[in-house]
Image (cartoon, coloured by chain):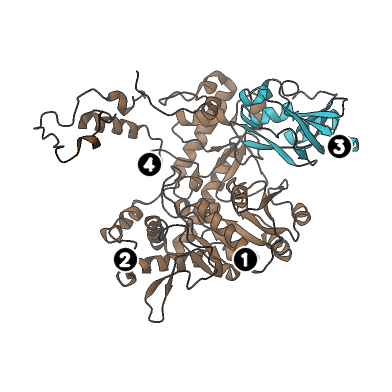
Amino acid sequence: MSNIPSELKYTKSHEWLRVEGDGTVTVGISDHAQALLGDMVFVELPEPGTSLDAGEECAVVESVKAASDVYAPVTGEVVAANELLEDAPETINTDAYNDGWLFRIKLEDEAELKDLLDAEAYAELVTEEDH
Amino acid sequence: MSNEPLIFEHSRPGRVNRAQSAHLGGNLDGIPESLRRKQPPRLPEVSELDAVRHYTRLSQKNFSIDTHFYPLGSCTMKYNPRACNTLASLPGFLGQHPLSAERDSQGILACLWDLQEMLKEVTGMTAVSLTPMAGAQGEFAGVAMIRAYHDARGDNARTEILVPDAAHGTNPATATMCGYKVREIPTDTHGDIDIEALMAAVGPQTAGIMLTNPSTLGVFERRIHEIARIVHEAGGLLYYDGANLNAILGKVKPGDMDFDVIHMNLHKTFSTPHGGGGPGAGPVGVSERLQPFMPIPVVGRDDSGAFRWLDERDLPQTIGRLSAHMGNTGILLRAYIYALMLGREGMVRIADYATLNANYLMARLRDAGFDMALPERRATHEFILTLKHQAREPGVTAMDFAKRLLDYGFHAPTTYFPLIIPECLLIEPTETESKQTLDAFVEAMAAIQAEAEKDIETLKGAPYSLPVRRLDDVKAARKLDLRWQAEA
């Protein structure tokens, strides 16, 4: 069973999101998603300053199996991208929820957080897809 | 199987071909000193026998359709009858200059005309242009025609192309290349397009939809007429990706499914080796409304029955030329000969046997305990097996199976595609494989499954019988370095 930390929010498209408490949120892909994709070889991240709409394609993670789009879970401006991943994309495989984060967004509308899945709902989704 | 050094590594200074012959040497007197090389070129210095042995040994390492079952199918390499190549290489064809006058080119023009007619017949389209030189160019031509059609009507608000999530990666790439935004349409749990999602996605911004039918999931899109109606009513056009044409040749016509444009990979379906980046041919077929925009040249006939090239004067709204002359004519000739050899009845048998073989193989693998991605659906020419249960317990993946199959003498099927099915093998036997070959493949898969349960370490280390063992996929993707350098 994959690791699904209870303090994070999730999307149906397998991104996770951490509310940082300073008006920003950190985004990555779930442990389940990295396990499905396999060994990461390239990551393409949005430039800080980019404005994103919730649901917009904004990053690409490429593994030995496939290149997959990552979607912005919420609307807002990108304030940071994880530069570590440029040289060490495998960090997503080893530490999806901490050092493997992708980018940070300055949240525009806090109400959007309510649309996201909590850990329990995401775990259900993963079990369902696994079936 | 030993590791063969590079031809450069066989090189020894001063070694030449036919060491015992009289050396004639070169006479450089006519070449000014300033234009002569200061250093000899760094070419391998080997004897004729060294070269013959080197390349023969390399050829013996080929894991090819001439030696092994290739369940990648028409997707990469179905069997191409030798006769097609032999006849397409007749001196009269090879010696034909592309700029020869039409009156001196009636023979080759007649062949290409016939091919256009045959492809029209088999696809049910109104007209065919043979000129695109590859599948990618055929796709480009198809979507460029869709754009030209909307532009000619002053309908400039159409900015989106719809692409199902099961599509080939080339489809969104083509749409993007032609300046469209791509909107993905999900697939439902039975492998069909999600019609509700499609209805929500179409609108005045829809330029068209790109579909492969049968889809990359190896099943026929059952509601194709409904999809066509929804897209047409929104003012969009339907593009047919011909990648899986082998499954329906002579049985179902894309024209009858209301497609407006189709590209065909003659190098996949019509007898040309493919999969090595060699020359291809991606003719496009069009419905009446796209006919004015076809790429040129097209072969036409004048009132006297003589053949001639149709160009800008005949098709002023054409999207233009895609190559200097008539695409890859040699590939077109192979397709022409293949179609002639098959005849109308044979064309249908391609679809019959491609489908029968796929369904036989699927049924036997299911009996052997393997899970199918869409167990309730009949396969078309290919089917998808998923190893997600094996991946969880005992922990062997589709890649482990693929590598081990090589040791059993089978080329691996497509792995990890389509992307929406976890741990999958996409298996396409094609029409030319015998029951014995298919049975042997099932036995190999069952034997690998038994290894997975008893001796997982052996399986994880495969392949053992090839020049190299398990490759480092990550390094190959990130630090690919194929350049040979002499040691300093």
Q: Are marks 2 and 4 in contact (CB under 8 Å)?
A: no
Discs 3 and 1 carry the same chain letter: no
* Label of residue B52 in the image: none
Q: Chain of mark 4?
A: B
**Quarter of the figure with the N terminus of chain B:** top left
**Residue B274 seen from this side:** yes
Report crowding for label 4: few under 14, some 14 to 19, many 20 or more residues within 10 A (C-alpha).
few
* Label of residue A108 in the image: 3
* Residue B221 position (above or below residue B440): below
Q: Colour of chain A?
A: cyan
For the residues marked 1 and 4, what is the alpha-carbon distance in whole angstroms? 44 Å
Q: Judging from the image, what secondary structure is the residue with disc 2 in?
A: loop
- x, y percentage for residue A98? 75, 21
The mark closer to the camera, 3 or 4, is: 3
Foreground of the two, B126 or B384:
B126
- Point out the tag, 2 or 4, that comes first from the N-terminus: 4
Q: Residue at x 71, y 31 (%)?
A: A33
The mark closer to the camera, 2 or 4, is: 2
- x, y percentage for residue B331? 40, 55
The kind of residue tagged 1 is: Tyr
**Quarter of the figure with the C terminus of chain B:** top left
The mark closer to the camera, 3 or 1, is: 3
* Label of residue B149 in the image: 1
The mark closer to the camera, 2 or 3, is: 3
Q: Residue furthest bottom?
A: B303
Q: Which residue is tagged 2? A: B100
Q: Chain of mark 1?
A: B
Q: Residue at x 51, y 46 (%)?
A: B75
Foreground of the two, A36 or A67:
A67
Q: Colour of chain B?
A: brown
